């Protein structure tokens, strides 16, 4: 069948015009990202493989937009097979023009909120649910709506979603009550649910409440949506309980019809797999009982000042404002301004870098600052109208005091891309200066055993850094997460889980101790 039909040409022109009438910020907040024609066809062509041949189709799209999936349904299936088709669109900006577009087609397009609509009665469910639900993050949902969604989703699917779940998770769970037994569902959703904590209930639903058929993760370097920085996956399942010995297909890259990598994974082994994104390539990873970075380091996110433009200055800027240097501490610039991965120190402890920054950090009460340091007090007053009222600053006492983040000897970049000149997205940095670091970095503070070894042998820091820098990309990426456009991110707990058994050999005092005995590793400071 043709990839594009005359009505699809009209729909694409309509979509372009409607998108242009909204700002990018508005569409991001509402999670409105239209499904491209080719991707919609790929999804419906795969659905045709899963459905019983010649069985009548009852189609549902809970977030239909202008009807990309319905158009693909019409291209991929003969009209006589489509017994019913229903869609929901909450935004009349898209819904009303879409209604007009499809007015002479057998599509029941409801202008309303799918999440508040009562499911159909017995015998009136749908056997094909295809949806690209709105990608609305949890912080854009008010408490009342979230409480309603939590209760309704649990009633529909038997699963209580996590508080940080995005709106798309609720759409998936709520649709359970709309499906007929043995019906097929294909959900185009962000792949991050496979690795993050809020995705655990979603995975529990897919493993226990339905028969998970396949998860195809698109290559994050090949964005499916040009206007959304999100790595996408298509999740396929059948509404029935899984059978013993059931296997799930995990595929990656390319298209649904022709993925770059594919493998079958026993559903039973997925119950204990914390991260699913790399399963297509690596299968279920066997977790070693050996030591991990958490045994050697306390890992924290760097400092979040609340307003870098107010709190961070160069030495010249400090002098020009005549501010007291004693209240400024050196802080490393962002990764793109860091020319080296080994930072040596000047005699005063500042980093040997072309770009030097200092962070304002004063813990004196405002009354004392006013009396003893009037110039500093005057500068602080300039931040009162806006900076002091930011989320972070308003929760500090005083508002201009920073968190306790001493200079870390080892640092890892928090996020990055797999650039051609660098074989992995994360950089490990050896910091021999007294500079702390901002929240674009993860800070690695040695625990007592490693700290003692470093104090005894100062040259050991380079060997530790070389070990960290030698951790292969696959191991790091297996713990981190990936977003659209090849953007990788690593949280402290994820970095802490990276295997690090070779580090024990650098600490003779504990090298022969069992991994379960962590007395020497437990941190008392930092």
Image (spheres, rainbow, N blue to C red):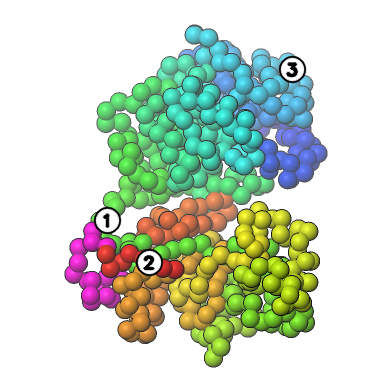
Mark sitting earlier along the chain (3/2): 3
Q: Which residue is mark 3?
A: 103
- Residue 269: x %, y % from top left: 30, 40
Instruction: Specify whether residue 258 is in view.
Output: no
Using a 10 Å C-alpha cutoff, classify the residue at mark 2 as few (fewer than 14 neighbours), some (14 to 19) or many (20 or more).
few
Using a 10 Å C-alpha cutoff, classify the residue at mark 1 as few (fewer than 14 neighbours), some (14 to 19) or many (20 or more).
few
Q: Is residue 513 magenta?
A: yes
Instruction: Specify whether residue 87 is in view.
Output: yes
Is label 3 or label 1 in front?
A: 1
Q: Residue at x 66, y 24 (%)?
A: 113
Circles 3 and 2: CB distance less than 8 Å? no
Mark sitting earlier along the chain (1/2): 1
- Image-quadrant location for residue 4: top right
Q: Tell me where the magenta segment starts and ends, as one range.
A: 501-518
Using a 10 Å C-alpha cutoff, classify the residue at mark 3 as few (fewer than 14 neighbours), some (14 to 19) or many (20 or more).
few
- In this rendering, the answer to whether 379 lies above or below 188 is below
Distance from disc 1 to disc 2, alpha carbons, whole Å, reads 26 Å
- Magenta stretch mostly in which secondary structure? loop
Point out which mark residue 288 bears: 1
Q: How many marks?
A: 3
| SS at circle 3 | loop
- In this rendering, the answer to whether 185 lies above or below 81 is below
| SS at circle 1 | loop
Point out which mark residue 524 bears: 2
Circles 3 and 1: CB distance less than 8 Å? no
Circles 1 and 2: CB distance less than 8 Å? no
Q: Is residue 173 magenta?
A: no
Left/right placement of residue 388 relative to residue 442 reads: right
Left/right placement of residue 395 relative to residue 220 reads: right
Residue at the outermost bottom position: 347
């Amino acid at each position: 069948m043709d990839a594009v039909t005359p009505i699809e040409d009209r729909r694409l022109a309509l979509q372009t015009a409607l998108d242009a009438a909204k700002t990018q910020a508005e569409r991001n907040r509402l999670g409105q990202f239209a499904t491209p024609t080719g991707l919609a066809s790929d999804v419906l062509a795969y659905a045709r493989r899963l459905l019983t041949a010649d069985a009548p189709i009852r189609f549902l799209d809970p977030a239909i937009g202008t009807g990309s999936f319905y158009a693909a349904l019409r291209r991929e299936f003969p009209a006589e097979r489509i017994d019913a088709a229903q869609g929901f669109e909450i935004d009349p900006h898209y819904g009303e023009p879409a209604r007009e577009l499809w007015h002479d087609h057998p599509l029941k397009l409801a202008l309303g909120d799918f999440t508040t609509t009562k499911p159909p009665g017995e015998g009136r469910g749908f056997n094909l649910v295809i949806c690209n639900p709105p990608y609305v993050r949890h912080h854009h949902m008010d408490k009342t709506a979230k409480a309603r969604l939590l209760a309704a989703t649990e009633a529909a699917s038997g699963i209580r979603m996590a508080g940080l779940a995005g709106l798309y998770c609720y759409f998936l769970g709520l649709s359970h009550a709309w499906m007929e037994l043995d019906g097929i569902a294909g959900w185009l959703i962000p792949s991050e649910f496979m690795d993050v904590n809020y995705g655990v209930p979603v995975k529990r639903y897919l493993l226990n409440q339905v028969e998970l058929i396949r998860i195809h993760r698109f290559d994050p370097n090949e964005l499916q949506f040009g206007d959304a920085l999100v790595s996408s996956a298509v999740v396929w399942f059948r509404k029935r309980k899984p059978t013993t010995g059931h296997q799930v297909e995990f595929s990656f890259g390319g298209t649904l019809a022709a993925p770059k990598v594919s493998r079958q994974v026993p559903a039973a082994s997925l119950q204990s797999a914390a991260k699913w994104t790399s399963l297509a390539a690596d299968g279920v990873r066997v977790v070693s009982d050996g030591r991990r970075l958490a045994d050697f380091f306390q890992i924290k996110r760097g400092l979040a000042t609340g307003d870098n433009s107010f709190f961070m200055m160069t030495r010249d800027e400090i002098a020009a404002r005549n501010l007291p240097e004693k209240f400024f501490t050196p802080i490393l610039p962002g990764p793109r301004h860091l020319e080296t991965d080994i930072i040596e120190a000047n005699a005063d402890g500042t980093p040997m870098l072309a770009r030097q920054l200092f962070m304002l950090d004063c813990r004196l009460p405002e009354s004392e600052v006013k009396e003893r340091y009037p110039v500093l007090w005057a500068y602080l007053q300039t931040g009162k109208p806006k900076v002091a009222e930011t989320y972070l600053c308003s929760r500090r006492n005083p508002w201009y005091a920073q968190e306790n983040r001493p200079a870390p000897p080892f640092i890892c970049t928090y996020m990055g891309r797999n650039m051609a000149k660098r074989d992995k997205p994360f950089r490990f940095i050896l910091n021999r200066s007294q500079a702390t670091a901002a929240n674009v970095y993860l800070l690695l503070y040695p625990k007592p055993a490693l700290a003692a070894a470093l104090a005894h042998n100062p040259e050991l820091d380079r060997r530790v850094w070389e070990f960290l820098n030698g951790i292969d990309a696959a191991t790091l990426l297996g713990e981190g997460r990936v977003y659209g456009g090849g953007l990788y991110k690593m949280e402290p707990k994820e970095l802490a889980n990276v295997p690090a058994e070779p580090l024990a050999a650098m600490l003779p005092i504990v090298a022969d101790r069992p991994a379960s005995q962590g007395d020497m590793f437990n941190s008392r400071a930092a």
